[in-house]
Image: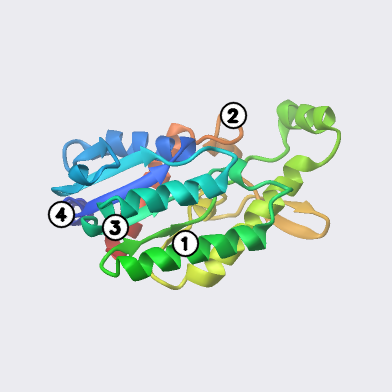
């Protein structure tokens, strides 16, 4: 791990996120000590030196706002200074009502455009985080209150979007499968549920306290995996 820290300490890294990303960054800061310069920032001046800068990107439940905001940050001058740039969406951005194919096509268009404009930047692609669907009294109450199986349908769509990401970028060397980390028990077994004949990945119950956000155990685990991915990709 020392080699990874030393390597990343020489990089200018830009990361846009909302709440699950904040969980990861909090864990990363706890693991960090003083090995990386971790700051909140999104303006070009932030990247005058090696730094791991992160910022709140767009608005939750509006994935296109995240696309636009990330592109705006990169085009503001950040793209001319950073080595690695990426952002992630939240589970609330993809629901049963989402046109997954259109959302993915828009994502590809944006990332392709940025890649052409800033060929020296390593743009990382990140899967959408998942929720813990069903299980326990809270899951039962959600289903009864909402009157239909929307929770499961939301998760199906998130998985569908992630599958498109995996198909397009999974072998690129510029891909972090956050969702895969969320659904894998520490012994390597997968967490899932069955819905209408489909096996759907499910956030491990022990990784969350509220069904969506990461607890310290999961956040530290995923932060470590992210560091390794950034090191390998960069």
Identified at 32% across, 41% down, the residue is 54
- The residue identified by callout 4 is 10
Camera-nearest label, 1 or 2: 1
N-term-proximal mark, 4 vs 2:
4
Q: Is residue 218 in view?
A: no
N-term-proximal mark, 4 vs 1:
4
Camera-nearest label, 3 or 4: 3
Task: Quadrant for residue 141, please give it.
Answer: top right
- The residue identified by callout 1 is 110
Describe residue 120's horizontal placement relative to residue 172 as left or right.
left
Q: Judging from the image, what secondary structure is the residue with disc 3 in? A: strand
- The residue identified by callout 3 is 84
Indicate whether 54 appears above or below 12: above
Q: CA distance from mark 4 to mark 1?
A: 27 Å
- The residue identified by callout 2 is 210
N-term-proximal mark, 3 vs 4:
4
Q: Nearer the viewer, residue 7 or 94?
A: 94
Task: Assess disc 4: are there few (<14), some (14-19) or many (≥20) residues with their C-alpha within 10 Å of its C-alpha.
Answer: some
Task: Assess disc 3: are there few (<14), some (14-19) or many (≥20) residues with their C-alpha within 10 Å of its C-alpha.
Answer: many
N-term-proximal mark, 2 vs 3:
3
């Amino acid at each position: 791990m020392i080699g990874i820290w030393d390597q990343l300490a020489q990089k200018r890294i830009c990361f846009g996120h909302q709440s699950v990303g904040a969980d990861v960054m909090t864990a990363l800061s706890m693991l960090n000590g003083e090995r990386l310069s971790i700051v909140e920032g999104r303006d070009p001046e932030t990247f005058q030196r090696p730094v791991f800068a992160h910022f709140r990107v767009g608005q939750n439940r509006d994935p296109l706002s995240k696309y636009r905001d990330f592109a705006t940050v990169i085009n503001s001058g950040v793209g001319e200074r950073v080595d690695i740039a990426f952002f992630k969406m939240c589970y609330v951005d993809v629901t049963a009502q989402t046109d997954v194919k259109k959302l993915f096509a828009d994502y590809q268009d944006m990332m392709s455009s940025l890649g052409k404009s800033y060929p020296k930047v390593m743009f990382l692609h990140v899967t959408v985080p998942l929720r813990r669907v069903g299980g326990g009294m809270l899951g039962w109450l959600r289903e009864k209150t909402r009157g239909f199986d929307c929770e499961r349908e939301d998760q199906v769509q998130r998985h569908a979007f992630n599958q498109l990401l995996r198909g397009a970028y999974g072998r690129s060397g510029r891909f972090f499968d956050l969702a895969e980390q969320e659904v894998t028990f520490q012994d390597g077994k997968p967490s899932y549920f069955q819905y209408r004949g489909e096996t759907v990945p499910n956030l491990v119950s022990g990784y969350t306290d509220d069904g969506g956000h990461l607890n310290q155990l999961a956040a530290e685990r995923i932060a470590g995996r992210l560091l390794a991915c950034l090191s390998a990709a960069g």
